[in-house]
Amino acid sequence: MDLLIQVLINGVLLGGFYAIMALGLALVWGVLNIVNLAHGAFIMLGAYLSWYLYEYGGIDPFIGLPLNAVIMFAVGYAMQRGLLNLIVRAPMFNTLLITFGIEVVLTYLAQLVFSADFRTINPPYAGNNTTLGSVVIPDVRLFAFGAAIVLTLGMWVFLLRTKLGRAIRATAQNLVAARLYGVEPRHLYAMTFGIGIGLAGAAGALYGVTSQINPYIGASLTAKSFAISIIGGLENPLGVIVGGLALGIIESLALLYVGATFGDVATFGVLVLVLIVRPTGLLGRTA
Amino acid sequence: MKKLLPAILLALGVVILAAVPWIASDVVVQFGINSLLLAVLAQGWNIIGGYCGYPSFGNSTFFGLGCYGVAIALVQWELPFAVGLAFGVALAAAFAVLLGIPVLRLKGHYFAIATLALALAMSAIVSNVEIAGRNIGLVLPPLNNDPLFYELSLALLIAATLTVFWLTRSRFGFGLIAIRENEEGAAVMGVNTTLFKILAFTLSGVFSALAGGIYAYWITFIDPVSAFDIGLNVKMIIMAVFGGPGTILGPVLGAFLLTAVSEVLASEVTTLAGLFFGLVVVAAVVLMPRGLTDVFHQFHKAGWRYFLNNIRAHRL
Amino acid sequence: MSAKAAFLSSLLLGAAAIAPAPAHAADILLGASVQLTGPVANTGRYYKDAYEFAVDKINEKGGVKVGNEHRKLALRIYDNQSDVSLSVRQYTQLVTQDKVNLLLGPFASNFVLADSAISEKYKIPMVQGGGASDQIFSRGFKYIFGTLPAASDYFGSTIKMLSALKPKPENVALLYADDSFDVSVAKGTRPLLKEAGLKLALDERYTTNATNFNSLLSQIRNAHIDAVLVAGHETEILNFIRQAKSLSVSPKMYSFTVGVPSADFRAALGKDAEFAFGMTAWLPSASLKDEWFGNAEEFAKAYKAKFGYDPDYHAASGVADVEAIVKAIESAGTIEPQKVRDALAKVNFQSLYGTIAFGKNGQITLPQTVIQIQDGNVVAVYGQEGFIKQPKYPMPAWNSR
């Protein structure tokens, strides 16, 4: 019983991290209809950025999270404004191809700049945990969980209640009308993508503290983020929490009860099921 | 006579290609097999993605099933190669029909993502299947006959291209194009959209599976990572799109050119090869999203401004 | 239009075929396709550095004596981007287009498994130091030789040590990744554990490149496992150790098949690497004498000076491959592939890597020395004759370090 509770807690905390990981992707996809296959590569870049700031600047990864997010926001803004805006009105399918190309380029650039050596962000508190009875709760994961709730709620409030958020949603839904109202869509799209990448950067920092960093972690992170976004549902910003939790718990339980080689089977099996039965996701309205 | 010129050139091209194993070095034959198989994949994708308008991101699943069909037949059951190919095709067809029915109900990018999810799931599942050798994979009996594999691949490509050619002149093909342009309208006009979509998906899967079967026997070693390689999906789509989706020879052209570029880079520039490939992809999507065939058609009208026009048409 | 273009591209293929092959030089050309980029590049590059280092040193000392003349070695290395099919094509290119005389291997068993089919097909010997899986050597191939000892014996000396530790571990967990090498290791480890009378309480296969070990670690803690043996890859082991710390899982000991000997692995973990056990078939000891490098200790110093990092057994193995080829050529008196292959089967000489001699199946037999990270250094603790140095056992809990 103790084992089950520990594994469930593991799953929930993992779910929190998954939610942060997928938030940027879900935002850009749900609002702008841009499917970013390079999302994982940006998480990787964020991780390297935090590592670099920690190794050479002595900036603690958590204290440096806002700095990381701002720098990654700038990168995302530039990328959208300079490159992705060029294909926004092409068939949506082209974004899949171009972001794939970007993923390849980013991965190889990271290999060139940072080499294939593993890096870890290892502040002294990285392995700390809190014990509640027989359950051990890693502190960093708890923080990530809290951050996930805060960020996702913040995103929900931002998109549904603030002027800028509404402007972004309006632009994505009706370009012509938005222009008539004097909204500058290129700037708004870039802002949104920038926020998405800023979130990816934050996820990267957290990833670097709990795992190891190398140029090739992007692809599997993208695949997971996809699963989380779809399972939760793209229409509702709170979807990533639901998707993340669902996936975290399912994966942890599958690894425990089915076998340690069944993690991906569980993840992608559930994804396929959701797509077949309820494509709009757990929180989406039925089509 | 002028009308026959393209046909004569094509026939000549095929003859030259068929003669390659006897006039070229071993390396070129290997490169040839690789690009021919990729061309088959691109052409297969063309049927479901180019003509039917359903961009499948999961044809690697069929390729992998073809690989494993041959591998299991040869290694575990000691059956001949042809039986293995048939087995692979059967697996792919069954998969296409069973999973095609639910997945083809989805539209646009949801379909693409669903097929991608299928590919990811399949890879994870097969790495747990005992008879497939789990994640270690299977080592096939070596057959030291590159020219045979070359000719088989060439024959498969010709078959695939002829199928696409037949498509452009058949009711089935018109139905697919109708579905691509306006699915609801096509249904109203009496096209059995579900049946046609599933047929297209299955046809596309069959070619991919055959390519997979030949690949497995040629490379003598497969595992879930290489058989269900997700990157293959993007490669075949880029080749089809780069060459010209919804055309007969576009995917073939795209496949040959891109594999040539990729191979040259891998042997000359090595470490930067991957980087350049990514840059080529990005540039192609921005500058020529309708593919090379479109460039050929429009270039003499618009000149260099063709590329600029593409950007203007698609940018925000 | 399209037809013309298709015609043109088939001409392209034809033209490429007629391009002239490079002129044959008097140097002895060795070829290899190594992972210089891609997910396994982190270890793959050790082989490139090792091959280059060995070739340079051997040339510096006069080259290879073939019959009555001295010839230099030349090296041709391709980057296979960690892609197995590309490496197969590159080996074919090395043999048929670059006309190399002999082959050196890639890193990783799954690559060697596929690439050795090429050496066998063209009957050109390949000496590799990157693949240890039993599968490679059980196909009856004659042209593949390996300087990594058998996978099934990796934990052999560790298990002997476990039997001798006080208090003896009450139960053991065996975790292994699902690739060829690690499955071979597990298969060989089980009977050894049984023989030693150690109880195998947890026997779990996990996905290669797994990042989530929380469930397995929770099981280990729950079952109060004393000894954990992990056969996996550096990325997984890094994650395992970090997550073990965050879940406060500290068995009496844990041992890993890779990572512990590599400098950058230890650097990535910092103090968390402490107490981890591993094994190596090679240590830079002065007692390993070498014809070209003096001894292993001097080799390690020179290597570090040139490349900036400490060599581990991968690098030493790579150097041994080149040396084995040279010795075989000198013994055969020719560079003819068949004769070199026969000479390779019979080589027996001392090198900085130990005694180089290949078994009937082409694989070397070398004992693994148990090592442990103590105070940031790799220390040999248990070898063929028993304890070399006292291991730090049992491992203290994470919060009391």
Image (cartoon, coloured by chain):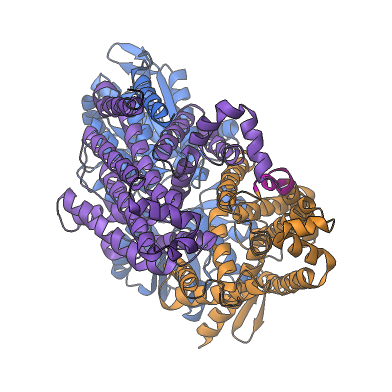
Chain colours: A orange, B purple, C blue
Q: Is residue C283 visible?
A: no
Answer with the quarter of the image where residue C92 lies: top left
- Residue situated furthest top in the rendering: C68
Is residue C210 found left or right of A240 in the rendered image? left
Q: How many marks?
A: 0
Q: Nearer the viewer, residue C259 or C292?
A: C259
Judged left or right of residue B286, residue A52 is right
- The percent coordinates of residue A152 (x first, y second) are 71, 71
Which quarter of the image is occupied by the N terminus of chain C? Answer: top left
Q: Is residue B292 visible?
A: yes
**Residue beneath the point at 63% across and 53% down:** A44
Magenta stretch containing residue A84, yes or no?
yes
Q: Is residue C214 above or below residue C56?
A: below
Q: What percent of the width, then of the height, locates residue A12?
A: 60, 77
B255 left or right of B272 in image: left
Residue C203 x %, y %: 38, 71
In the image, the segment drawn in magenta is A79-87
Q: Give the dominant element type of the magenta stretch: helix, strand or loop.
A: helix
